[in-house]
Amino acid sequence: MTRQDGPDKVTGAAVYAADYNADDQLYAVLVGSTITAGRVRGYDVDEARRDPGVVHVLTELPAVDKAFAALPSPPLATRFLPMQGDVVHYWGQPVAMVLAESLEAAEGAATRVRIRYEREPFINPDTAVAVPPSPESGYGMLDALEFRKGDTVGALAEAPMRAGGTYTQPSRHGNPMEPSAIVAEWHDGRLTVRDSVQHVYAVQDTLAAAFGIAADHVRVISPHTGGGFGTKAFIWPHEILAAMAAKAVGRPVKLVLTRQDMYSIVGYQPLMEHRVLLGANQGGELQAIVHEADNITAVTDDYVEFGTVPSKALFASPNISTSQRVRRGHVNLSSFMRSPIDGPGTWALGSAMDELAHTLSMDPLALRLVNYAETYPADGTPWSSKKLREAYEEGAQRFGWWDRPKGGTRIGHWLIGCGMADCTQGQFRFTSQARVRLRADGTAKIEAGYTDIGAGSTTIFPQIAAETLGIDIRSVKGVSGDTDLPYAGPTYGSGTTLAMGTAVHLAANDVLRQLADTMSWPAEQVRADSSALTWGDQRRSYADILHAARIDEVVGNGEMVLPGGASADAGAPGVASRTFGAIFVEVGVDPDLGLLRLRRATGVYSVGAVVNERTARSQMIGGLVWGWGMAAMEASRFEPSLGRWLSQDLAGVPLPVNADIPPHIDMSFVDEFDPHAGPLGAKGIGELSATGIAAAVANAVFDATGRRVRDLPITAEKLLDPRM
């Protein structure tokens, strides 16, 4: 099934937050701090105010309501709000806001706002001392801060074979094509915002708490979101500041972050250091897994990147130990980024497993098969479904793993190497609701507040409704991204298809039940196809049924309900829920120039039922590109002298382009149905797609060159360093 939103996006008909303009709006531009730590001691805004078109220069905004302090995190990114005091915690922190009749006037005046500072020494987060995170930063994952199973110290001491090391990865910024943007307007005590987000209801609750008003007095609209990658999963200060400014001046305010703002105001994947040690017997059976990790975070809040989670989820071992730390520094807060938790974790663990395989003189895939986890390694819980063994077999066959050329084979001046790694991602389920309207003319409409961030939602949900109702997908339209619609869970955590898809499926079935009731037919025995309902040898078109009942439409409602009334969980009770996969890559390395090139890749995945293979394969290819950037190109460097991000735009950060990715990308899925996930049997894949790639690339580089790179990204100077 092809993308239903494709024509709107390529013709420019799709409307994003920054495309909207309110009547009588003002354009906002933020003025960021030019110091990293200290205090604001005064402002000179007279020159800026004299600029033509400038209406206001705001230097302080009202305090938030006390209800703000009770908000959970996530979705709230930080409880520290700029422009409510004089303390500066990071470079680029908003310290003033210019409002003008045009964007150009606001931008010009922002350069003429003069600020006096009192500088204080700043803490470089990259080199800060790692400390235990605050307990409230666990996001419901407190058991992942420290985990112990068995005796890893004793097992490591007795293990005849050991391998591992320290594996690092730099901070990286997500850079979605559409920067964060918001238009806020107040009318009669009610707030309406057009916002570029991944969950409109989280924005609604946060803004309502910030202003101390009822949630139904806040409406959030986000019909299209131009990429998020987790960056727009949290609620960031600029969203609250824009709404505050609009209320303060009595006019709508439009704030579109610049690319530079996206580096200092919203989150990013933090620098991480992993220390992994593996102990095994002579046959390769893992006797111990130790994984310690720390990540940078802000001095104002703790964000924990739970990169140790894969080490208690992928391989069978009687002894497992994991722990998490944070390094607090004067930098803006880090956050989720594709793929959180398992993306960083599979980089370190996948590299260590390859090192162990070479220590054992054992094939890396054979080592994984020896340590295949038939149940959840942490506690023995059965899997909701798992076909990783089949994915290994299929991937090895498609790639030609067992017959691959010997490492270091030359083709011209290129050294050729092959590597593989595991892919995995935890699963989340979110309470979600949907409404489906079937009209007498045979068309249908889905109504739900989910956000479309480009992953295929606007295709998958109409497809589910169309298949359930037995009508053509072109007859189904979706209305989404609005808090006035039935509640939808967030578009993150790989839970959208599972949660919203279930709600849509149930709503469409509710329509069929009502149609069957109208005909006095048993709902459990009817069949829907070709815009008609069949029971036994009786068949009636939807148009005839509605016409006979003298109604214009039938409205069905569906809801993904979680046990205990929870708003979210990590899978059905009594089972462990994850997606899995295996990625195989071939790289070429120019030993004289240090060039690294991806030659081909094969991925095979165990993800439950695949709703739409076209969009699913697109997700996996996109994840591979994302992972290649992590492995070989991307890094956001914190400049230790200036105390700021060194490059705050796309000019200084290499990103993969078409020329970096070969046409030989082979992505497929094993046949699987997860009965515990929901009636569709499907799981989420958006984050899974970017896991394992970095490890597979580093393992392939070792195969080609004999150089073990443990510090991402794998750039030319590391491949040419004579010390390696």
Image (tube, helix red, strand yellow):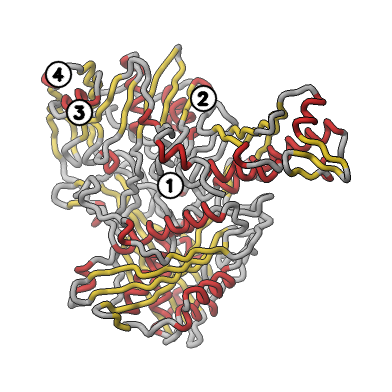
- Counting residues from the N terminus, which is met first, the one under dot 2 or under dot 3? 3
Task: Using the rendered view, name the quadrant where residue 107 is placed.
Answer: top left
Residue at mark 3: 107
Residue at mark 4: 51
Q: Nearer the viewer, mark 1 or mark 4?
A: 4
Q: CA distance from mark 1 to mark 4?
A: 44 Å
Amino acid type for the residue under numbered disc 4: Asp
Amino acid type for the residue under numbered disc 1: Ser
Q: CA distance from mark 2 to mark 4?
A: 38 Å
Residue at mark 1: 137
Mark 3 crowdedness (10 Å alpha carbons): few <14, some 14-19, many ≥20: some
Q: CA distance from mark 2 to mark 3?
A: 33 Å
Residue 706 seen anywhere in this rendered image of the structure: no
Q: Nearer the viewer, residue 199 or 589?
A: 589
Q: Secondary structure at mark 4?
A: loop
Q: Percent position (x, y) of residue 657?
A: 31, 56
Q: Nearer the viewer, mark 1 or mark 2?
A: 2
- Counting residues from the N terminus, which is met first, the one under dot 3 or under dot 4? 4
Q: CA distance from mark 1 to mark 2?
A: 25 Å
